[in-house]
Amino acid sequence: MVNCCGLLNTNKEPVPLKSVEVELEVRDHVATVVSTLHYENKEDKPLEAVFVFPLPGDAAVCHFSAKIGQIHIVAEVKEKKEAREEYDDALSSGQQAFLLEESEQSPDIFSLSVGSLPPGESASIRLEYVTELAVQADEGLRFCLPAVLNPRYQPQGSGGSEGGNVQVTSVPASLVPYSLSFSARVSSPRPVSKVESSCPLDPLQYLKTEQTQATVKLAAGHKFDRDVELLIYYKDAHQPTAVVEAGQASSQPGTLMGDPVVMLSLYPEFPPAVMSSVASCAEFVFLLDRSGSMSGARIKSATDTLLLLLKSIPLGCYFNIYSFGSSYEHIFPKSVEYNQKTMDEALKNVEEMKANLGGTEILKPLKHIYSQPCIPNQPRQIFVFTDGAVGNTKEVINLVKHNSGSHRCFSFGIGEGASSALINGLAKEGGGHAQFITGMDRMQPKVMQSLRFALQPAVVDISVKWDLPKGVSVTVLSPPITALFQGQRSLVYAQLTGQSSEASEGCVTVKYSLAGHPSQNQLHFSLKPAEDTGLTVHRLAARTLIRSLEMEERERKGEEDGGVKKKVVELSVQSGVSSAFTAFIAVNKDNSEAIQGPLVRRNVPTPRMMACSMPKSCGVPVITQMMGYMPRPDPMSCGVPVMALKNSCNKRRRGPMSCAAPVMDTMDKGTTFDAGDVPCSLNAFSSERRLPKQPPRDPLLQLVSLQKAAGCWVLDPALAAALGKTSEEVERPKPASVNQEVWATILALIWLHGFKMDAQEEWELLAMKAVSWLRAQKASCVTECVEAGNALLGCNVQKDTLGI
């Protein structure tokens, strides 16, 4: 069920949020982010400003404070219901109050309420969080400051949260009325080789001659049309490390915050002989988002990527393709063996796929996939492609975790505003790998990297053994490691209890079995606490444990025992780290006089991307809402501005929010669309005038599309055209004794190596299939074919380079 979608009218109301300043400090692969939000009330009445915004899904929010004039108030973490009641009581009595809470449906959405800001008054809100930086396929570390929050689709029948009347007010990115400044400082024991971004940056400035520290700033004039993404590259970055952090002096020994905590970064190295082989058995299930917000370039890129995937699957595997929106479809009733017939049928369906299935209900197709029995000796690998506009994030991740023993899940977040909580959560709980495709990124190389991971033999029997000095014990705070990939980091947090000399050393051994061969990696580390770490490691460890307990609580849903929730609240309060069951609350008790006058609510708009924008010439903001059955909504999932309700004693009621807007007359009954998308049929303009001419097909994809499932190419006019030649030009130089398919396949390989080496990651696996096929033919005159092919195509590719 869709809560709301379309362009939202801000009614020309003043927006009290004036600017956002973000300071990022990266130490090796951990980031500390400080955001300062400046508010000013230029109206003649007191305001409540409500701002719903995204944060990284794995962020540990650890500080929240407010400054009004010379008064500085630091917020406390309290149980969420208690914090909400304290906030409401403060507003009812005319006091200033500030509330920061995490969505109970998705941990990457937060709501900030600034209450009773008097006329002419200013306030600065400081928000701090820490997060780990994810390792990308090209070995860069990714930091993303989500600037875009797309409305999340709330499926029919899914539960909302426990009340609250906060709602998302979103506007097109070009209409955001506040500014953003962003600066970053990067430091590491290893030199910083480069920092890249999809946003314009000022030049990188090194602070030391050895280039281990650098600063960079976002160029002025950021338009909120994309997330601020930084890719940080270190020299020799993938080295196992351990950081021991001393406990908090004011905390009790034996508690998480009172004891030292160690953070291990493990990078397993697998034997080269195993890594050079590619598995020839697997069941690949591709799950493609076809909701309205995937229209345009997103769906085109996704279907092109499916073409590459289908050509790269080894013979002997099984596969199926699902697509989903408000409903879901599958090409085959169950996974089928990969051969020429099934590949052709799948490709025909893929070419016809459009972003026309409405909302984003991913739960139903996942349940159907998991209901299918696994194929013996064909490990299941699920590839999920979505822009992540999902409202029931935690429910989806919980389902993947519940079925984690039967598959590996590889997830791809497409476009700006994709939910990091969903994309990272799917991969983490599914034992796979997550990738994000934003800006001008090509999807294909990232997806093919994940396909290589999927074709790696599964690592099994993973265990972690600790060897510590006498008198020191360890409590592991992270969930057990369930997946290991070559070159990918695994993080482990552990609490160290007891005493040891500073000179003592610990050792961790990770044992596992790979392709039937037992292996192990060891890491020796000093138990001496690192300097100047603050409590970053403790907070990340607390966040890790909190997320695990929240998952356990969701699995116990419906049971009476509230012990797990109680543990989460206690840990959240003790560590000062946010959770789904707690909130930050600050009340200004220094203002002696109650603030007079009725309190007016102002929803601060969040930028969002439109998949199908209304024409510029239209000139009128449009509010649309598609409604049928209305589930109890998440307080952070509705995009229509609604004034806060007050009862007769001026105390606001926090309960299920009612959003109502008329359905547009042009809407067919029963039609549902993804939140945030105005269906093109609503436009008064003809579809012919809006559809751009189709660009010519990418030459690489044109050639790849002609490859057969076995790996070979056929000598025909289509191949000649893909090579930029006529049929006669291609056929004339063929050695007389050579099979036509052998000649065609060698030409295709020469063309790939000669003209598309910059895209080798995309075609490497399908080229391996072609080489295997050629070797099986035991063809003569291969050297002569390569020489003739080079002469025809104007290349100089050696036979050894081709691998034949």
Image: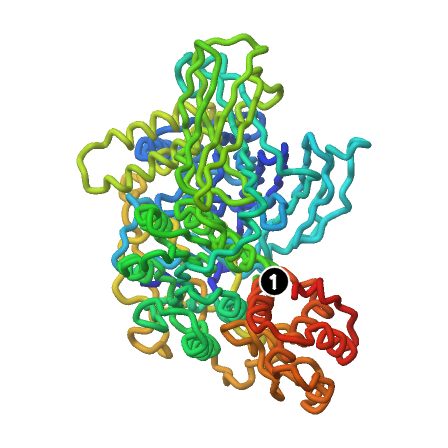
User: x, y (%) of residue 561?
Assistant: 20, 32
In this rendering, the answer to whether 442 lies above or below 433 is below
Left or right: where does residue 751 sit relative to residue 474?
Answer: right
Task: Please tell me which residue is depicted at 42% across the width and 20% down the height of the picture.
Answer: 474
Q: Determine which residue is flagged by label 1.
A: 764
Q: Residue furthest bottom?
A: 728
Task: Please tell me which residue is depicted at 46% across the width and 37% down the height of the picture.
Answer: 518
Quadrant placement of the N terminus: bottom left
Q: Give the residue type at disc 1.
A: Glu
Crowding near pointer 1: few (<14 within 10 Å), some, many (20+)? Answer: some
Please tell me which residue lies in front, 650 or 525. Answer: 525
Left or right: where does residue 213 sit relative to residue 590?
Answer: right
Please tell me which residue lies in front, 157 or 323. Answer: 323
In this rendering, the answer to whether 587 lies above or below 619 is above
User: x, y (%) of residue 625?
Assistant: 37, 66
User: x, y (%) of residue 458?
Assistant: 44, 48
Q: Is residue 443 visible?
A: yes
